[in-house]
Amino acid sequence: MSLSDTLSQERRARLAAERLLELKQAELFEANRKLSKHARSLSDEIIIKREETEVLRDENIRTKEDLEKANVAVHIAERRLWDSIETIQDGFAVFDPSDIMIAANPAYLRIFDGLDDVRPGISYPEIVRLAVEEGIIDVGDLTREAFIEQAVGRWHAPVREPQTVRLWNNQFVKLVDRRSSDGDMVSLGLNITSTIRYEDRLKKARTKAEAANRAKSAFLANMSHEIRTPMNGMVGMADLLAETDLNDEQSLYVETIKSSGEALLSLINDVLDYSKIEASKLSLHPEVFDLERCIQDVMVLLQPSAAQKGVDLIIDYDMFMPTNFIGDPGRMRQVLTNLVGNAVKFTHTGHVIVRVVGLPDDEGKRQRVHVSVEDSGIGIAPDMIEHIFGEFNQVEGAHNRKFEGTGLGLAITRQLVQLMGGEIWVDSEEGVGSCFGFHITMDVVEEAKHLTLPSWMHKAALVDHINANSLILEKQLTALGFEVSPFASAEELLTSPLDAQVYLIDNKLPNTDIAKVIATLRVRGVTAPVLLMTSGPTSADRLDIEDATSLQKPLLRADLWRTLSALIPVEPDEVQKTEGRRMRILAAEDNKTNQLVFGKMLKSLDIELRFANNGREAVELYQGFQPDLIFMDISMPEVDGKEATRQIRALEIDTGTHLTIVALTAHAMAGDEQEILAAGLDHYMTKPLRKAAIIDRILQELPQGCRPILPEEPAQVLAGE
Ligand code: ADP
């Protein structure tokens, strides 16, 4: 090879080497650049990590401080809790889930005073065993083993009732144990010694009081009985004496003795009954009795006082209910008398309805009988409802002050109903009325009979102005198979087709002359029988309407059926003429004895006499009864005689009439007469009244068209004067 080739070869080699060097230098540069970049990012990371480490350190320090504070707080709370638990008088202990005591307060440990083993670490069954064996717990009637078994069994039971144990020193501890959610058992031992002692004392005092109360009631029962015997003698003898020949003054004395005696007797009867019930000496005497008749008997007895006020007594006895039951009729009558008597007493206008319904049991041998006594009286305030069933309790208030009574009636009634296995309740609204109800279950003696009527009876006309009465009677007649046409007045009846087979007419229709109504019916060719529904035992007879049959209210289903079945259609030629009505006299007098005396004086007269108990009633009766003459007492409660007269005179302005009103007064002072006459009264009579003077006055006022008031010669009637 030539030199130049060699040289050029070397130059080429050198050039290649220089290029390679350049390349390697460039690579080295690039590698250096990357290295320095990585070194920079590493140092950045180090800085961040360092900062993070510092934050963490700070946090760590804070957490440590917090933990320390929390530990201190927990410690304080634990100390306070134990301080409190240790100061309480009742025992407190905690056991772990395997029944080992973890902690207990001194009160708990004190029970086991002297037993060193009872401390944290001991198990519950061991505590019980030690307490029993050392005689700390009184095991009562159980053996020691039985007691331990029972106590440990209770401890392990899923639900534990508190248990009271008696300790050796006569202290009583109530054990209350509860398991917590993590299985620990918290046990409380409450010292209830003082409560037990107190209860014990109360029990003893109550037993003593009950014994004393029974002794008192027994004494009262005996005494009332002893008092009743001579009282009966007094009342009975006064009764007999009243039947003998007495002058007016003597009669008055005898009547006063009798009425005072009767009032006292009824009071004693109440006390006797109540004491008997209290002393558990009252027993029932069950027998077969007719419930419907029993109710009617009570209603008939109360009829006069209800009629005096114009209050209607109505019985609504379920048509499909039997009437014969097994029960104590005497006590049933007493319950009804109390309830119906109260209803009449506290009702001034309207009605008193006794409703009876029965719920038979499955076999129909017994009935749950519901009786309710509903009135439209003064009602009872809600807060008084329970009060009135208490002994000697009455509603005190302006409305009630004028009513007599002992406040024993309802207390006795409730006890009697309870004795009969029943319940009593009341529903009442002041100023609207009350409804007393009770239910008792009795054996039924016979099933209700299905009553049928004579075949000629289809239609009945019913005239009654009292809606409640009319509705009930309509129901009863419909159940008997009648088609009933009800009328509220005689005019309504007389303006309708007269095609009934029987006419049932109330004899107290307002402003209606019943005799005239019947005469009109007959004149218009009605031959069907007329049934007059009367309110008093005698008022039907007094009407003297031979052309009508009377039926006494409140109506008994059986009586209604019997009377209807016995009716025969009246033939036209049997129609009789009535010969004028009786003179109507109203006497306003608040004193019952005076009413009695007045009534007796006029007994022999053929008149219709009604009494008003005060001026308000007198004005009402002036409108309803339409008297021909009024005798007016001057001093009466509520509205006096002068005021009543003024009101009547005001009413007369509309009618243009003038009724004679005679003042009856005890006022005999000079000047009284002028004052009384100025009030609108026509005449003036001073008490004590003289029969002859009164009859004389009546004779002078006898209206035309009325019957004569004296059946005999006046001289004969007055002969006793
Ligand atoms: P008495 O009627 O002898 O006072 P009761 O025990 O029978 O005693 O009644 C207690 C009280 O209950 C009555 O005084 C009266 O205030 C109230 N009371 C009872 N029945 C009725 C009634 N039907 N309407 C309004 N108040 C009544």
Image (cartoon, rainbow, N blue to C red):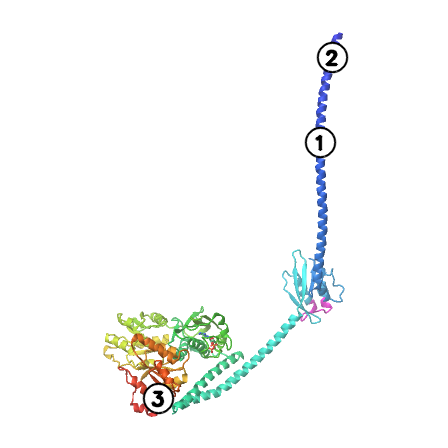
Q: Real-space Cα distance between discs 1 and 2?
A: 43 Å
Observer-nearest residue: 496 or 308? Answer: 308
- Residue 402 within the magenta-colored segment of the rendering: no
Q: Where is residue 288? Give x, y as percent.
A: 43, 78
- Quadrant housing the N terminus: top right
Residue at the spot of label 3: 691
Q: Quadrant of residue 696?
A: bottom left
Q: Quadrant of residue 345?
A: bottom left
Residue at the spot of label 1: 40
CB within 8 Å, label 3 to label 1 = no
Q: Earlier in the sequence, mark 1 or mark 2?
A: 2
Q: Quadrant of residue 594?
A: bottom left
Identity, as a three-letter code, of the amino acid under mark 1: Arg
Mark 1 Cα shell of 10 Å, populated few (<14), some (14-19), many (≥20): few
- Quadrant housing the C terminus: bottom left
Residue range highlighted in magenta? 131-145
CB within 8 Å, label 1 to label 2 = no
Mark 2 Cα shell of 10 Å, populated few (<14), some (14-19), many (≥20): few
Q: Secondary structure at mark 2?
A: helix
Identity, as a three-letter code, of the amino acid under mark 2: Arg
Q: Say above or below: 660 vs 34.
A: below
Identity, as a three-letter code, of the amino acid under mark 3: Lys
